[in-house]
Amino acid sequence: MNSRTNETDLQPRPEEAPQESRSLMREIKDKHGDNSFREQSTSDGIPTLWTGADKIADILRYLKHKARPRFPMLYDLTAVDERVRADANTLPDSDFTVVYHLLSLEPFREIRLKVPLKGDPPSIPSITRLWPTASWYEREVWDMFGIRFDGHPNLRRLLMPLTWKGHPLRKDHPARATEMGQFSMPEDRHIEEEEALRFKPEEWGMEQKSDEADFMFLNIGPQHPGTHGVIRFVLQLDGEEIIDVVPELGFHHRGAEKMGERQSWHTYIPYTDRVDYLSGVMNNLPYLMAVEKLAGITVPDRAKVIRIMLCELFRISNHLVWYGTYAQDVGQMSPVFYMFNDRERLLGIIEAICGARMHPNWFRIGGVAADLPNGWDRMVREFLDYFPSKIDEYDGMVMGNRILKVRTQGIGAYNTEEAIEWGVTGPSLRATGMGWDLRKVRPYGGYDQFEFEIPIAHKGDCYDRAIVRIEEMRQSLRIIRQCLDNMPDGPYKSDHPLTTPPIKDGTMHDIETLITHFLNVSWGPVIPAGEASGCVEGTKGLYSYYLISEKGTIPYRVRIRTSSFPHMQIIPFISRGHTVPDLLAIIGATDFVLADVDR
């Protein structure tokens, strides 16, 4: 296993970053005209520019191919309904805003571009010719907001049913089922819904036959053990060879972003647990990081280390689920039982600390819910002593198995450039030979105080994606041991007045403190106006929340960018030319969660 050693080349020095951001802004304005842009200050410090719809494609093309540094990854593309925004007079005149978030990986830089739109329907040029990964993002924005992307090859709903009326993330769309009237399914609607599920190849530009053979179209899912959840893959086959794949999403869509715009800043935390439901508190962290940036909250050192320890425990828990089911997908039955047994040990530790297992909802604004209980160190130490030999045992059982090697080596491969084009991050990117990990290139939450290596592989196939995840478990053990041996003293939560639940000292001594405590618990804190994103190196890749506050008790906009969404979109690209059994190996090696895809 190789490890990247020159991480310092990727990490900007804090005092240099603002100057480099200003230089980038100046470069863009000089190239495209100073009058074409308006700068915006944000709580997260990411360079943010407003520009027009007529210029956005040229600007994005310049940033991708010619800027210094280049921004080769379209990290996210989303939108905001501005029509009922209280501070709309401070923004460019718009009904909707399309937001582009680009990344430069070496060196690590970020830039956010915004385009104000008016009209009914609002429209903007598609950028699918610049980035293939833009296809699903643009379809999602059309689905959720009704914004048209001119030139998109197949602009249709992505997450909602094709028969759905309206666009759910518009502010005038109901946020609760109780606001929509009683649901009914009369016979004519049942027929309409059934017909909408019929797959029509010509709508996807597919031929029914070639000069030599008729193609077969095969459904895998929505209920299939190899899909790890409710999703449908429609395969175009020439015999056993896959010609194309069409994934159909949305079966797990629960409106997680819409729910975030109706909950208080504090009461939304449990909802984040359910997005990547195998990563537990790691879902809480990017959301809370964004809130803490908006509020100007500094997290105490003890709370930082507790958070890191819990996140790394959940990284191992996630990888154990993946490891066992991955082996099962290619024909090995025993490993999943052994690995789930070890996961039970680990979840027992998490339950002892947090009070719950899969969805502990334990991180809070400003820290964590409670201090570590008595005996936590003994439980963690016993697991650290027990588990390393089990990883070695599983390596021989699974990764050394000749059948698994035949089923996964050379299957579903892509290189680093292709991974970046499709927005791939995390272990799947590192499997292509790029030693890039956000915990190293831009340490967050205290990771700069820990020693660990970045596992990489080189072929970018299913087998190498497995190699990276297995080594990540060893590195997580290394981080957890440092947490165990160096847990700092001090408070487990900030004393900032906007932390939740708020500090209770003094509530029984004066009425003003009692009133403040009551309001902050019942209504939640009033977070200052602004916008910020929090991003973490999750179990499957980069995972972030982009929040907009109007200085209220609830967010105005909650955007969840997950890693599984682009990783799912690349599956057709890497499956063509393989066979149906290969597809199941590709799905297993991708390590996605469908609630993470659909939100």
Image (tube, rainbow, N blue to C red):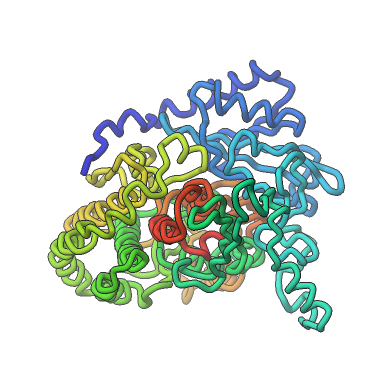
Q: Residue at x 58, y 27 (%)?
A: 63
Front one among 43 and 313 = 313
Give the side of residue 247 with respect to residue 415, left or right: right
Q: 116 above or below 318?
A: above
Numbered-mark total: 0
Residue at the far front: name it. Answer: 212
Residue 249 place in picture, x, y as percent: 60, 62
**Left or right: where does residue 156 sit relative to residue 561?**
right
Front-lying residue, 461 or 549: 461
Decide which of 337, 406 is in the foreground and name it: 406
Q: Is residue 525 visible?
A: no
Q: Residue at x 65, y 61 (%)?
A: 159
Q: Quadrant of the C terminus?
A: bottom right
Q: Residue at x 56, y 46 (%)?
A: 532
Q: Which quadrant: the N terminus? A: top left
* Residue 320 rendering spot, x and y as whole percentages: 30, 65
Residue 572 position, x and y percent, is: 53, 50
The answer to whether residue 445 shows anywhere in this view is yes
Image-quadrant location for residue 433: top left
- In this rendering, is residue 444 above or below 264? above
Residue lying at the far top in this picture: please name it.
30
Residue located at (74% from left, 54% from top): 145
Q: Residue 43, how many percent across, how many down? A: 55, 43
Q: Is residue 18 left or right of residue 494?
A: right
Vertical order, 378 against 136 (above or below)? below
Question: What is the quadrant of residue 114 in the picture?
Answer: top right
399 sits left or right of 226 in the view: left
Judge by depth and name the residue closer to the eye, 465 or 477. Answer: 465
